[in-house]
Amino acid sequence: MKHLLLIATLLATTQAQAARDTYNFNPGWRLHVGDPAGAESPAFDDATWKPVTLPRAWNEDDAFARDIVDHSTGIAWYRKRFTLPANVAHRKVFIEFEGARQAAEVWINGQRVGLHENGVTAFGFDISAEIKPGDNVIAVRTDNRWDYRERATNQRYQWADRNFNANYGGLPKNLRLHITDKLYQTLPLFSNLRTTGVYIHAADFDIKAGKATVTAESQVRNEHHRTRRFGYTVTLRDAATGKLAATFQAPTQTVLPGATTTVKAQAPVTGLQFWSWGHGALYDVQTTLTVDGKPTDTVTTRTGFRQTEFANGMVKLNGRVIQLKGYAQRTSNEWPAIGLSVPAWLSDYSNGQMLASNANLVRWMHTAPWKQDVDSLDRIGFLQALPAGDSEADVTGRRWEQRMEAMRDAVIYFRNSPSIVMYEAGNRGVSAEHMAEVRSIRDRFDPHGGRAAGSREMFAKALQDVAEYGGEMLYINKSARRPMWAMEYSRDEGARKFWDELSPPFHKNGDGPPHKGQPAPSYNHNQDSHALENVRRWVDYWRERPGTGTRVSSGGVNIIFSDSNTHHRGAENYRRSGEVDAMRIPKDGFFAHQVMWDGWVDVERPRAHILGHWNYAAGTVKAVTVISSAQRVQLTLNGKPLGTTEASEPFVFRFDNVAFEPGELRVIAMDKDGRKLAEDVRTTAGAPAALKLSAQTHPQGMQADGADLALVQVEVVDAQGRRNPIALDTVKFSLDGPAEWRGGIAQGPGNFVLSRELPVEGGVNRVLVRSTTEAGVIRLRAEAQGLAPAVLELRSTAVAVSGGLSPRAADAGVAPTSTRGPTPATPSFAVSRIAVPVASAEAASGDAAKAFDDDESTSWVSEAGQGQLRLRLAEPATLSEITLKLGGWRERQYPLRIAIDGTEVWRGLTPRSLGYVTLPLLPQRGQNVTIELTGDAQGGAATANTEVANQKIVDTGAASLGRGVLSIVEAEFYRKP
């Protein structure tokens, strides 16, 4: 009775205020793996089924325990009883699924209401005709077979791929129930409902003054039996403070019975905070329909306002150039023994770690992320590129139609998200016709959102006419027209457990099983070499950043951020390319990126990071490597200077033959005049003495909803409480109270997934504990041989649920944050060199103009023995550098001679690269440049590259070039500012 009174009170209160009720529909489900007959019937006995709170993948135990190809698949049923008030008989009721994997067939009270099959996008159903006042039953049959086929066409989905799309089956995303008046604003759920919802956008930006014109549009449907006249009022409130920002309205409108219309209101708004990188400035926009002055329907849309531009080879955010720096991340974004279904606060923590590494963009790979991750990136201020569903090829027929239906649904569902700045048409290049189709979806459903539509590759001028950005997976691309950025660079792998060869467990760098029959040292790094690889790969894009010429690189995203339960090449059965491990504990690569990426383009805050730790055996002599953005660094040991040095390569400072002694190793980063800019310290920890437990939980404390998690960290510490960085002790956990053990991960049998005993690695590990629906005290005890134990006490808080409905949203209590503040008004880069344009070129063979046409799909290729290219600059200049993209760049080295007006300014062998090489020139003023091949090119004709299955992706054209041939994709000439 108490629960019935609660829900009746909630319904009455919200109806009086807004006449729309939206409920968290996650509580109170039962789960069964299998396909029992009659499970859709309300009378079916599900008493023995497992009680669960959504979101919950039925095969969550597989996450990181099994290789992706071995994830459990098949049929699973979810059922739930829920209670509705008497007045629903005269209202509209909709159910919203954020997604299902792969297919979900839904019954309400035994009546089939629909099917959704693409396994990615959100969907919904109008269940008004099937529900009734009082008790109701929903049953959902899910099917996550890898080879699932669309029923109507027998066509498989391209993105149901064992390589990259971890298969967490069933209902692993949130659900909501909406109850509205029959005059209502629709939901942004095009599949099944065919509706588009609310669209909020801004224009006429004055960033400095905090002004913009804000427009709200709502699709409105009238299912009353008579014509309705209604008003439309828009209210903006700061999402963090609740402060009123603006109120405006549209003239009264009329809608016929059974008709659908779109109503729009707009107004100039002042005092706005603009959403930016690291600045989650959001607004709650309430759009209210009124009849006779009384509200009949109110929708709250959380959004943010920002200005974007994609031109001149660069991306601008709020008028400031930003070089894209970040990660290509699997959309499963998974955790051990959980999969993707974590609470909203933990999504913010995980995504916030990307931001803390000073990244600014995540490129979700192959499929659209779930709404919780999209909302999370809105809150923290982090850009994202959004795919819908694809694989490693352009396709035709029904498979392309499936991709476009998913793209349409994703655009409609996410178009109010300020963090989405790009829509991705494909994980490989697509045809001009297909690219135009993606743009037409964007232009129809999101014409004012400031989001570019593009795809991987898209280099040719004809493709750039339709694609608004592009870039390869592995290599460096530049453009003076469209932003070009690398979409999956630095693919090496390494375990967090291995610091270096001198630290326990003394893993020899690169040791590990072969991959595809070839040695695989790149996929079995220690932390030190993996971090250095990350630095060297980023330098390729940093060299070509905005400010370095007319043609620039817009950046790149490193694959991946967190270790992932997807295809792998190293010793484990999961991918270890992450800058953090699967429990989001940072590796050294995390801090290396933090150093290099602390700025919109140029580094704005100098940093320093010492790779590794300072706990070695007596007598150890080793190199100390520092990653820093300063001009010079000084190293001291226990206060004694060990030397000052400049970078041996960009961002890398090295001190050789440092003899270990316990104490404090300190690096001081300095400018060219010796002023201190930053420092970093490593202190020798004492012998392991005790365990230490600490926890991260929901900002309002652990919620007893059956889905919340506590992220518990265990450390091995010395007598002074300092973590011992080389400890590998096995820790045994015991758990008491209303909670469920989900555990963590470590190297060893079954990856220790779900085990209550697992080792720390580098002195630290983490485990997850899940709440139940019972509130109370939770006690976690950790013990290890020879160490003092630790006990952690948590208290979970009751969550209001009645009749299967909760008024508390899944993301309640999770607030927007600002870590970097508003967009700075200052320039984001200093011009380091100025491009000198080419007026003309000639050669004895080949089309010389292709060497400077800003089109990387073309190149000048000489005939054998005719490797000379003569170029005339637009004006005389004293050149300081020449930058070349040479045919077969990854495999080939060319012996070249470069002359200006006949005077030799460079001679040598060009280095291999991932795209462009820059050659310093002797100062010589002139206008005529000659580039001449002086011998046979060196290097193999082709590279057998095990990091990708499709070798066409890594082809640089070397196999088609004779050794006496010179091939130039692009040639650029520079002078000093």
Image: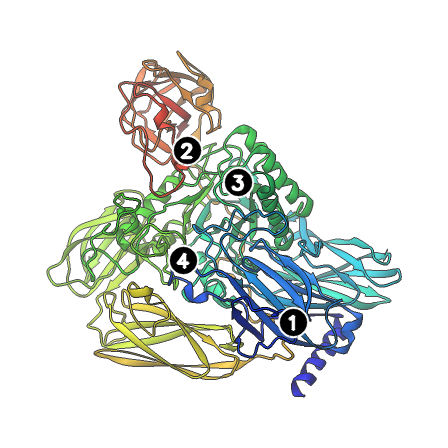
In the rendered structure, are the residues bearing label 4 and label 3 in contact, judged by CB atoms less than 8 Å apart?
no
Residue 931 percent across, percent down from the top left = 35, 19
Of the residues tagged 1 and 2, which is closer to the observer? 1
Amino acid type, label 4: Asp
Q: Report whether 402 appears left or right of 146.
A: right
Q: Earlier in the sequence, mark 4 or mark 3?
A: 4
Q: Which of marks 3 and 1 precedes in the sequence?
A: 1
Provide the residue designation for mark 3: 455
> Element at badge 1?
loop
For label 3, the crowd category at 10 Å Cα-Cα, with few meaning under 14, some 14 to 19 and many 20 or more, is: many
Disc 4 element: helix
Measured along the vertical axis of the image, is residue 3 above or below residue 841? below
Looking at the image, which residue sits at the far top? 844
Q: Residues within 10 Å of mark 1 (few under 14, many from 20)?
A: some
Tag on residue 70?
Answer: 4
The Cα atoms of the two marked residues, 1 and 3, are separated by 46 Å
The residue at which mark 2 appears reads as 833
Disc 2 marks a residue whose amino acid type is Arg
Q: Which residue is mark 1?
A: 41
* Residue 327 location (% of width, % of height): 44, 50
Instruction: Rate crowding at label 2 as few (under 14), some (14 to 19) or many (20 or more) other CA atoms within 10 Å.
Output: some
Query: Which mark is drawn over residue 148?
Result: none
**Is any atom of residue 451 visible in this view?**
no
The span from disc 4 to disc 1 (Cα, nearest Å) is 32 Å
Judge by depth and name the residue closer to the eye, 128 or 934: 128
